[in-house]
Image (cartoon, rainbow, N blue to C red):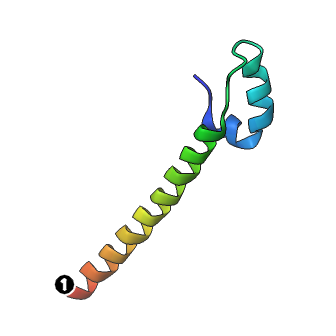
Amino acid sequence: MLDIHLIRKDPKAVEARLRLKEPSVDLTLVCDLDQNRRELQTKVQNLRALRNETSQKIG
């Protein structure tokens, strides 16, 4: 299994190494999905903070 941190750090190098075994490898989708997941996590954290703030105001 590949470490997502390694893919984030240097996707072109990881892709080049993977292509030695499988020429059709393309990490673009993996990078896009990872970026989307990170954005969603940020939104979730912001919503949780808002919920906590609202809960404290209510009681």
**Secondary element at tag 1:** loop
Please, is residue 40 above or below residue 54 in the view?
above
Image location of residue 29, percent across then percent down? 59, 39
Location of residue 58 by image quarter: bottom left
Mark 1: amino acid: Gly
Residues 45 and 27: in front is: 27
Specify few, some or many for label 1: CA neighbours under 10 Å numbering under 14, 14-19, or 20 or more: few
Question: Left or right of 11: which side holds 28?
Answer: left
Residue at horizontal 62%, vertical 26%?
Answer: 2
Residue at horizontal 74%, vertical 28%?
Answer: 15
Please, is residue 24 above or below residue 35 in the view?
above
Image location of residue 57, percent across then percent down? 26, 87
Image location of residue 8, percent across then percent down? 69, 42
Location of residue 30 by image quarter: top right
Pointer 1: what residue?
59
Question: Left or right of 37: which side holds 53?
Answer: left
Location of residue 56 by image quarter: bottom left
Residue at horizontal 72%, vertical 20%?
Answer: 18
Please, is residue 4 above or below residue 20 in the view?
below
Question: Left or right of 53: which side holds 32?
Answer: right
Residue at horizontal 56%, vertical 46%?
Answer: 34
Quarter occupied by the C terminus: bottom left
Please, is residue 3 above or below residue 24 in the view?
below
* Tally of numbered tags: 1
Quarter occupied by the N terminus: top right
Residues 53 and 29: in front is: 29
**Residue most extreme to the top:** 21
Residues 7 and 45: in front is: 7
